[in-house]
Image (cartoon, grey):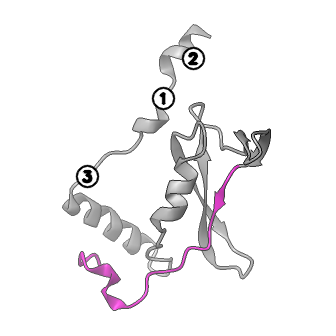
Amino acid sequence: MQTELLTKRNVATIGEEITHELGAEFVLNYRKANPTDVKAYVIGKDIINQILAQPGCVGILFYNALNEFGKKTLVYVGLDVNEKPIASYSAINNEGVLETQKGIVGDRIPLPQGEDFDFWGWE
């Protein structure tokens, strides 16, 4: 138990800013290894903000997935401090009653439109 407390990650701090050059290198490496795979996704800030606004949410977990049409997509959910997906949470409704809400699950991400989405020159 004590060891678990000492090694627990702070989910809110996972990830870091990298340089454009390193990002380009990562993207090109992936594209060379997977030339026919989806190149990019677009996710709007509204759904990201909704997920992060859930009580206890400290991060987002992205799953590779196939939608109902067999197309590659991402499904994403909020994570709590214990790195568990938020399946439900308690909230007070408009009548002041405590109720259980389902956790938000995101998808329906379109592929970038137009040829200028790759403005970094990562092609």
What is the CA distance from the residue labelled 1 to the residue labelled 2?
Answer: 10 Å
In this figure, which residue is indicated by the disc labeled 1?
9
In the displayed structure image, the side of residue 27 where residue 96 appears, left or right: right
Q: Is residue 23 above or below residue 96?
A: below
Q: Earlier in the sequence, mark 1 or mark 3?
A: 1
Residue displayed at 28% across by 75% down? 122
Q: Secondary structure at mark 3?
A: loop
Q: Residues within 10 Å of mark 2 (few under 14, many from 20)?
A: few
Taking depth in this image into account, of 116 and 95 the one nearest to the observer is 95
Residue displayed at 56% across by 32% down? 81
Check disc 1 and give the amino acid type. Arg
What is the CA distance from the residue labelled 3 to the residue labelled 2?
Answer: 29 Å
In this figure, which residue is indicated by the disc labeled 2?
4
Q: Please provide the residue range marked out in magenta.
A: 103-123
In this figure, which residue is indicated by the disc labeled 3?
18
Residue 64 place in picture, x, y as percent? 60, 63
